[in-house]
Amino acid sequence: MLDSTAVVVRPLRASDKTEWARMWTAYLAFYETARPQEIFDLYFDRLLGDDPQDYNGLVADIDGKLVGFTHYLYHRHGWSDENVCYLQDLFADPSVRGQGVGRALIEAVYASADADGAPGVYWLTQDFNKTARHLYDRIGKQTPFIKYTRS
């Protein structure tokens, strides 16, 4: 595991676009999908926007090189007066997996959610994502919910 001081988690910046796009491309490929350039541009703009109900982006940096990201957003919940936080995307470069990058990113989302008054944080993953699930089983709690989508 990396020395925890080696991973720096910070907000996404406009100057990160090229490296973010490289990593988001790899993330999408892992999930066997791709998106057109206009979606890359739209998503990146949303990640940098200032709408409190829009997306937030954090990146992980080791020695000046971006090695991971997370995207999350806040939304209302019908069972609470507090917002909840949905961690939508999490990526660690394969060269640093198992070295604390994913944990550092999730813990940064937890800290952000706490600071913004949204203590509930949740995310989804695919059942075949075994590497990530090893981390998730240590840092979160699996729920019994099953996701459905419109057919």
Image: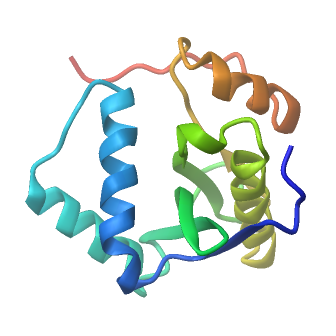
Q: Is residue 110 above or below residue 115?
A: above
Is residue 51 rendered to the left or right of residue 132?
Answer: left
Residue at 36% across, 27% down: 31
Instruction: Point out the image quarter for the N terminus.
Output: top right
Q: Is residue 127 above or below residue 103?
A: above
Q: Residue 147, position in %: x, y?
A: 48, 21
Q: Residue 125, position in %: x, y?
A: 55, 27
Query: Foreground residue, 3 or 84?
Result: 3
Q: Quadrant of residue 14?
A: bottom left
Q: Is residue 29 above or below residue 39?
A: above
Instruction: Point out the image quarter for the C terminus.
Output: top left
Query: Foreground residue, 109 or 17?
Result: 17
Residue at 58% across, 41% down: 95
Residue at 9% across, 61% down: 38
Residue at 40% across, 19% down: 148
Q: Residue 100, position in %: x, y?
A: 79, 47
Q: Is residue 148 visible?
A: yes
Q: Residue 28, position in %: x, y?
A: 32, 38
Query: Foreground residue, 3 or 41?
Result: 3
Q: Residue furthest top?
A: 128
Q: Is residue 75 visible?
A: no
Is residue 91 rendered to the left or right of residue 44?
Answer: right
Colouring chosen for the image of the structure? rainbow
Q: Is residue 7 above or below residue 1?
A: below
